[in-house]
Amino acid sequence: MPAKPKHQQSHDAVNTPPSRDPQLMRRMYALMTKLGDSRGLEATIVGSLIGLLPEDTLTISQARSIAEILFEQCPELLDLAPLSPKSPELTAAAHIAIAAGYALDRALHQRDGLVLAYAGEAASLESARETLGFAFTHKVPLVVIVRHNLAKLKPSYAVHDLSYEVLPAGLPGITVDGSDAMAVYRVTQEAMFRARHEGGPTLIECKTYPKRTIPTRFRPWVQGDAVAYMEQQLRARNFWQD
């Protein structure tokens, strides 16, 4: 049987929930366990990056705990951000600007694929508003993943959505539980599908908490231990294999 066209593959990924795909769920689980203790990032990393195609470009702001697995699984991917631990960490806004420029280059030269920017941790996206608005206007093939670390939220502050900050620019913004790999995968696939079909960029905000014990006030936004939660979902669907 001939392989499906890549756009058909992305269409199928959007329209087939990962909860119906035991092979995909098991692969996610295996990758998350390999990542080990990644400060609550296991589901965010695996759920967002597992759907990349060889012609796509990945940019990484935080290299630790990512490069080893990702580049073993997808050696074709190109990383634009510094991987050396001696290199200064880019802010989310600076990283988004780099990724948007690369995505614009793809659009201008009609190159296949999209740019997925793993822009690291962000407390605000105000400084990235202009870049994101430009990317939206020019419909560049860009998907941005930012981490919203709830552990850094002051006790007196209410939980808010970073994605809401960019909505006035017209850019689609999605907030998702960063400890639920299936949820991250689903929204990322939708964003990738849009980018591959000239629908422009999407911002995905993944809320995370770096410890397994989640304060009560964060429970509506974060599941907790991503690996344990995936194991629970596998067992509930009889997809588990000891």
Image (cartoon, rainbow, N blue to C red):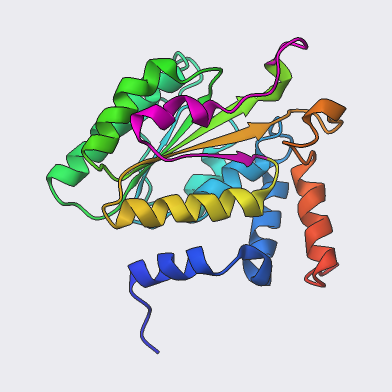
The answer to whether residue 228 is seen in the rendering is yes
- Residue at (65, 56) in percent of width and height: 28
- Residue at (78, 29) in percent of width and height: 218
Would you say 228 lies left or right of 149 here?
A: right
Image quadrant in which you'd find residue 151: top right
- Residue at (52, 38) in percent of width and height: 67
Magenta segment: does it hold 202?
no
Image quadrant in which you'd find residue 194: bottom left
Bounds of the magenta segment:
153-178
User: Which of the image's four quarters has the C terminus?
Assistant: bottom right
Q: Position of residue 48 (x, y in %)?
A: 53, 47
Quick check: 148 above or below 48? above
Front one among 223 and 46: 223
The answer to whether residue 55 is seen in the rendering is no
Q: Position of residue 39 (x, y in %)?
A: 70, 30
User: Which of the image's four quarters has the N terminus?
Assistant: bottom left
Magenta segment: does it hold 177?
yes
In the current view of this chain or complex, which residue is farthest to the bottom? Answer: 1
- Residue at (56, 17) in percent of width and height: 123
Image quadrant in which you'd find residue 193: bottom left
Q: Position of residue 119 (x, y in %)?
A: 46, 29
